[in-house]
Structures are given as structure tokens and as C-alpha cells.
Amino acid sequence: MQAILEDLQSGAVDVYEVPEPELRPGGILVRTHFSAISAGTERSKVEQGSKSILGKAVARPDLVRQVLDYAKANGLRAAYQKVQSRLQSLSTMGYSCAGTVVAVGDGVTEFNLGDSVACGGGGYANHCQVNWVPRNLAVRVPPGVSLEAASLTTIGAIAMQGVRQASVSFGETVVVIGAGLVGVLVIQLARAAGCRVVAIDLDAERAQKAVTLGAHIGLAASDPRLETAIQEFSRYGPDAAVITAATSSAEPVELAAKLLRDRGRIVIVGDVGMGVSRPNMYHKELSLVMSRSYGPGRYDHAYEEEGRDYPVGYVRWSERRNMEAFLDFLASGSIDVAPLLENRYPAESASEAYQQIRGGKCYTAILEYPAREPKIRSTASVAPPNASKNVQGNILVGCIGAGGFARAHIFPNLKSSPKLKLESVATASGVAAESARRSFGFTRAQTPAELLQNPDLHAVFILTKHESHAHYVAQALDQNKAVFVEKPLAINAQQLEEVEDAYRRSIDRGNSPFLMVGFNRRFAPATSAIRRFFSGRSEPMMVHVRVNAGYLSPEHWTQHASEGGRVIGEMCHFVDWARSVVDCPIQKVSAVALPSGTRYNRDNVAATLHFADGSIANLLYLANGDPALPKEHFEVFCEGAVARLEDFRVLELVRGRKIQRTKSAQDKGHKRELELTVDAIACGKPSPIPFDEIREVTDTTFCIEKAVSTGEILPLAKTACMEALTGS
């Protein structure tokens, strides 16, 4: 399909051919007819992207601080690679489009095939021929409203939320500062609400054009009669000012404060400077309110991605309801967007459209997409190929997922391996797949379904978000592929059972299934040294692991219930580390946590693992520490000796009052883990981590979660699948 993407290194915008997005539960696939380029937001993004690295750094000091923090924790080389990986990516553009529903995901009942819909959301309503859109970011287009006009719906919802935040009422005077696309829509909506509207812009021509688009009067910000004219028009001074301008200067806010009546209201919609001086604000007791995008629900993962709507009795105007209301205004003729639709370009000419936008003279540009139907691939399974014990020639690898971790740790190591070829890459959106193909030399970019059913692939690496791991693993095993999956293997018992069932089916077909999970820390050189240090032991071990993981806000994707949380998603690493060092089965688990009523979301956990040989591991996973302290600290006590490891940089081995201290560059075992995995696949050997251990570690994390809730000491269950595998 066609997708308009930005090269993050150069800032160039062009048309690319990328795989279509995957149909996922909770959303719909929409064939785009029209999408609208936002003259303000997107122009700013392109201009920033075209800057040099230094220019980008100056423009985004917040990102520079993140890079510096990452460098402190992981080293300059790792930070440099992370930045380069990001810059070598392609980024989606757009957030407002309209089209036709061509597929409906599980759990979605309000849309049918063929429905005309308007869609919103950065990363969803992209300038792409086909988009996957969550249910709460799509609305039906009423009869009589063209899809071309409906493509402005998201931008219209932004304007509508600004008007709502101004709390205007019939007969009030509203000043709109910034007469661009959003400003003009605010003007029309405020007038439709019975307000008298003044348009102000730096460009006198644009201010006058606003009068033809709905404003009662239009004035240039430099007009010497500005204050007098507005005072005469409004009698008492404007009641509210809605600022839709985009500038780093605080002048628009200062101007609004100067013009408004006593106790007037300022609403900021645009990206403007906030350094307003105190006198006007104080003496008039003005209210200053921010308007956040399309309305309540924006940036709320549960609302936007999980489809959890707000009860209308509590939240009357969510972002979806604002979108619906804007379409109702279009249907009734209360607002007229026809003059805003004059600049139309075929999608193939998107770069020309962006050049026009960067000229600053047009409100928007509408992109029109080819009418051909998209290829909606079937997800039905095909007959799996025959499994092969040994791979002849290079291993052909397919990777599902191309996020930051994959680009930083997996793709570079796979690319450097002489034993394999990067054959295919797939992502849910399709865009990231094309970006990874170009950056790392994959032969092709595909959809996940195409990749899994590709008979030529020997191995599949699953590098997606946590919730999807188990499903992809099961599908890959059913296709007799060797599987490497990043941790965790599964996020709940049902998913683990799905994997076990697929593993069993593979055995029943006479295969030796290969499944490896990315528990890299057990393969670190320091971990190997600790195991050698205690080899031949005859007494139980006492293991202590302290992880200064740090605070993550509830909005971070790993905190979402649908992704399993941090215990299952990250603490699993340290369960596996203890399991590999003790080298004995875990029999039971106990755990406690600090109360969940704090901001830490029950991320401060103390778990105790009891092993079959009497060993005990104490794991402290902490979110309430200081990041200045090294993240990971390990201690092992056994037979009068001690091993101590600090952040995989400093290792101390103590025995007979002698301390052997080794300091090295941080190595958490990523490279060695992948070397062993590739070698095992090539030679037909078992996975570097036996399946019973993988399952045991995964089940242990579930027990930790349950023990925190119940206070019980929980034994690990052994399933029928495991009993068959272990012969017990």
C-alpha cells in the first residue's frame, strides 16, 4: 500500500510502498479515501526533521536529557547506536482521515464492512492507503457529508475542544488569535454557537480572509487600531480568547490578556510560549486554560487503544463525541469547510503538497488515495512445512516487531552473523517493517500473517509488545518454525497454555520444537563466571538480587494491564537469572509488595523463591529508588564463598579471605544469547534454555503476582504437557 512517511534523518517526506497493517482486536481496517495535512502541526514536524543533529538537539532539549541519562546507564556507544537507530527510521505522518471500513476486528460491534468513517489519532489515522484504527478513534460519517470534508474531522474536534474549554455562551465575544486552519474552524464553531467573533493574525491578508470564512471582523496583530476596534465591537471587551497560533513567543498570550474584559478567559490550543507577565492576568483576574487536543480520552491508553469509553453521564464530550459533533455540524450546514478543501493532491504527489504547506499560504492540503481495494490477507493457517533437523546453507530468518529494543540489540547482532540471512520483517502497522528493511537489509517487508506462513523461513524472531508474544509463538510453532521470542513468553496462564498446546502439537507431529526466550542475563560472561565459581557445590545457595528499576508512570505501555505489568514483563529476567545460577527447579514462591495505593502501581516487590535443593533466592524489584544508584546488584552466598556482581560491570569473587575483582564494559549477554540460538538452529540442537525451564520461570512470575495479592506461599504447578516432556 502507499504510505506517506518522513525520513527522520533528513526530514524529507515521500511516498513509500509498505505492507498493509494487521487487523487486530478492538479496531477496524479503513481504506483511506482522503486525509488532511495539518498546516501547523505537520509543517512544524517536517521543519524540525530537516534540521541538523545539532538543530534537532537545540529544538528538543528534553530528548537530549533522555539520551544523556541513557548514556550514563548504558555507555556512550550504546547511546550513540540508539540515536542513530532512531534517526534511520521512517515516521508516519498525519492524524485525520476518512474512508471505508474493509475489515472489522474482534470485539468491535459498532462498525460494519462498507461503513464510511472519519478517523483520528497520530499513529492511527495516518497518510496511508490503509489504516488500523481503534474503535474509539473512528466515527461514522453522516449521510450528505462527503469523505473529503470528513477528512478534517480530527482537526475540527481539536477546534471544538478549544471552544468547549472557553465555556462560551450565546452572545459573547470571542477573539481567535491565529487564523490558520484550526483558527478558522474555531471561528466557525464559535459563530455557530451564537458568539460574535474577532479574528487576529500576524498576516493582514489572512485576517481579512477569516471574515469570508465566518469571522465578524478580522484584524492584523500589528494594526494600530486593534484595541480600539475590538473595544468598539465588543462594548465591554471580549469575553474569551482562543489562541490557535504557533510560536515560541508568549506575545499571543500577552495580547489576549491585554484585550480581554475583567475576569475573561484565555484558552490555549496552539503551541505558544507561556511566559505571560503577571499584571494583566492579576488585575483582571483572568483564567488561563489549556485545551488538550481532541478532548477527554486523548493520551489515555485504556480509552484510545483498549476501547474503554467514558460513561456519557460523567464525560459528556470525549474525543470521539467531539468528532461526532463536528460531523453533525457539517451535516447540518452550520459550518462550511468547502473553501478549505481547495488544495487537493493525489497521494503520489504528497511531497509537492508538503512543499505547498511549508509555503505557509494555504490552510491545508487534502490527499486523495487510489481507489483500488486493499489486499486483506486471510489469517487462516496453511499446511506447515516439514521440519528439518539441520539447516542447509544460511538460516533464513523472519522478525516480527521492529521497536527500539529490536533495532538496538537484536537486528545488529543478527545482521553480523555469518550463519543467517535477514529474509523478512513484519510489524502490525507495516510502516516500521519497511523502515527496518531499509536500515538493516532485510530482503522484504511483510505482514505478520505472510511472514508466519512463509515456507522458506527457518526461524522466526518475535520482538513485539508483550501481549502478542504467546499468540505469535503458537502460530510459529504450528508452522514448524524455530522460535526466538523476547521475554516474557506469556502474560497469563491462558497464554502459557496456548504455547504449551502448540509445543505439544509439534511433538505429536514427530518434530523436536525449538523455542527460545530472550533471557539474556544468564548468558552474560559474569553469570558464567559465577556458575564456574560455585561448580561442584554440595550445599544450598542463598541468592540476593536487588533491581533498582525506577519509577514508570501509569501511562507507560509496560504498566498497562493488557501487557502484563512489570513483574511479568521485566522481573522475569531476574527469576531466570536466579534459576540459571542455582541450576535447580523452583518449587514454591512467596511475595509481598508495597501498597498499590501509591504512585508506584505495586512495582515495589519482594519475592522469595524456594528451590528443590533447599536454595533460596530473594528478589527485590524496586521502583521507589534513585536512578543514581546502579540498576542491578547480585549476590550469591554458598559454602563460605561469595560472588558479587554490580550492573554486569564489576564482579567480585570472594573465597578464603581473597577477593578477585574484575571490571569490564557492561555485557548483559545479548550477543552470546543470539550466537547460541543461531548455532543451535543451524545444527539442529535443542534450545539453549530447555522448555521446562522457560515454562517454570514464566509460571513463577504468575505465582509472584498471585502471592502479592493473596499472601500465600504458592507451589509451582506441573502441567500434563510438562509431565510428558520430563517423563515424571
Image: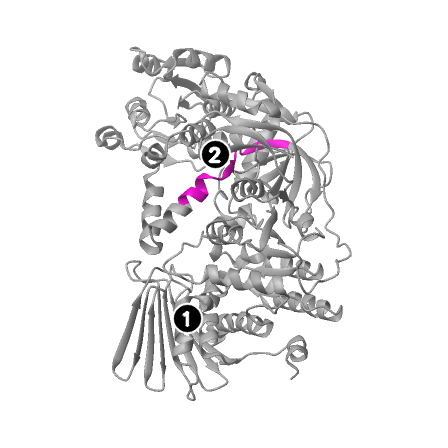
Q: Which residue is mark 1?
A: 527
Residues at marks 2 and 1 touching, judged by CB atoms closer than 8 Å: no
What is the secondary structure assignment of the residue under circle 2? Answer: helix
- Residue stretch in magenta: 83-98
Q: Please tell me whether residue 206 is drawn above or below residue 626 in the rendered image.
A: above
Q: How is the image coloured?
A: one colour
Pick the residue in front: 281 or 578: 578
Disc number placed over residue 161 in the picture, else none = 2
Q: Quadrant of residue 606?
A: bottom left
Q: Is residue 96 visible?
A: yes
Pick the residue in front: 340 or 291: 340
Quarter of the image with the N terminus in it: top right
Q: Amino acid at mark 2?
A: Gln
Q: Whole-Å distance between the Cαs marked 2 and 1? A: 55 Å
- How far across and down, in percent of the image, does residue 676 sit? 53, 64
Name the residue rendered at 59%, 18% in the picture: 338
Q: Quadrant of residue 113?
A: top right
Q: Amino acid at mark 1?
A: Thr
Pick the residue in front: 629 or 425: 425
Q: Nearer the viewer, mark 2 or mark 1?
A: 1
Left or right of 364, for residue 140: right
- Indicate whether residue 94 is drawn in magenta: yes
- Indicate whether residue 233 is drawn in magenta: no
- How far across and down, in percent of the image, does residue 240 sit? 38, 27
Q: In terms of sequence position, does the residue under pointer 2 or pointer 1 come before the other?
A: 2
| Category of crowding for the residue at label 1, using alpha-carbon neighbours closer than 10 angstroms: few (below 14), some (14–19), many (at least 20) | many
Left or right of 418, for residue 267: left
Q: Quadrant of residue 366?
A: top right
